[in-house]
Image (cartoon, rainbow, N blue to C red):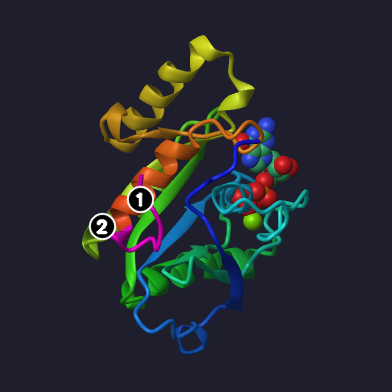
């Protein structure tokens, strides 16, 4: 597993659902991580910040129904958004996902961009398209990340990225390929995250 040399410190801040409970991080720029349940959001955060178990990786998809806030290098924040679409979660809870995420996107002033995760073996659907729509409505930049690319043979990776890009109506060059098990794509992911946050905002050598 590759180490991210740009990360010096990371801490969990809190979990919250409602805007009144979101942490006041005194204007630290923030990037959010979104995607269907089990797509690899928590694993991506752990990989990005060199921690095995900071964000809880769950073998029971859909358990994370809170927004989880982290601070990296005391310079920026990451927000692990609740996963969407696990059938065993009660309908009432599933109904709250959309409004919960939309409220966050609308009200989080420090939010600079969103990493939208799509499993390498799935095609993006209406939910991902909707999310891109909300982001563009609120002026939030989106970086699509294709997760679990280790599950594909090397020759199938580029076509998979292109397919996800098409499904999202974006160009393949915009898409980051990522594997939490091998660390492949880490440097690309960091670069794109840094760019979302703004130059100099990462508190380290931006690379
Ligand atoms: N092979 C592989 N498995 C992964 C990868 N990322 C996550 N997983 C696995 O997928 C499952 C769900 O991951 P998790 O990070 O909890 O997803 P979340 O629900 O989106 O937060 C776990 O069993 C992880 O170990 C990856 O890049 N490669
Ligand atoms: Mg998770």
What mark, if any, has residue 206 been given in the picture? 1
Q: Earlier in the sequence, mark 2 or mark 1?
A: 2
Q: Provide the major secondary structure of the magenta segment.
A: loop
Residue 200 colored in magenta in the image: yes
Find residue 62 and report its image quarter.
bottom right
Do residues under tags 2 and 1 come within 8 Å of each other at their CB atoms? yes
- Residue span colored magenta: 197-207
What mark, if any, has residue 164 been given in the picture? none
Q: Nearer the viewer, residue 67 or 86?
A: 67
Which residue corresponds to the image point at 36% horizontal and 76% vertical from the top-left?
108
Task: Look at mark 2 in the image and give the residue it sits on.
Answer: 199
Residue 55 colored in magenta in the image: no
How many neighbours does mark 1 have within 10 angstroms: few (below 14), some (14-19), or many (20 or more)?
some
**In this rendering, position of residue 114 left or right of residue 5:** left
- Assign the N terminus to one quadrant of the image: top right
Q: Is residue 172 above or below residue 39?
A: above
The image shows residue 188 at horizontal and vertical percentages of: 40, 37
- Assign the C terminus to one quadrant of the image: top left
| Residue 58 visible in image | yes
The image shows residue 54 at horizontal and vertical percentages of: 68, 61
| Residue 125 visible in image | no
The image shows residue 101 at horizontal and vertical percentages of: 45, 67
């Amino acid at each position: 597993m590759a180490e991210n040399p740009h990360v010096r410190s990371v801490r969990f801040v809190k979990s919250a659902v409602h805007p009144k409970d979101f942490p006041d991080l005194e204007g630290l720029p923030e990037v959010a991580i979104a995607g269907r349940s089990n797509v690899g959001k928590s694993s991506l955060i752990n990989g990005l910040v060199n921690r095995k178990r900071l964000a809880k990786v769950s073998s029971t998809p859909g358990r994370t129904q809170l927004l989880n806030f982290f601070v990296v290098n005391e310079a920026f924040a990451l927000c692990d958004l609740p996963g969407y679409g696990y059938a065993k979660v009660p309908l009432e809870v599933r109904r709250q996902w959309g409004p919960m995420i939309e409220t966050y996107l609308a009200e989080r002033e420090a939010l600079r961009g969103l990493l939208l995760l799509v499993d390498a073996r799935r095609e993006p659907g209406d939910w991902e398209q909707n999310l891109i729509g909300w982001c563009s409505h609120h002026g939030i930049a989106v970086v699509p990340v294709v997760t679990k690319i280790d599950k594909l043979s090397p020759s199938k990776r580029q076509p998979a990225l292109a397919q996800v890009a098409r499904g999202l109506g974006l160009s393949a060059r915009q898409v980051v390929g990522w594997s939490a098990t091998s660390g492949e794509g880490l440097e690309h992911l960091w670069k794109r995250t840094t760019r979302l946050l703004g130059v100099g905002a990462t508190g380290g050598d931006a690379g």
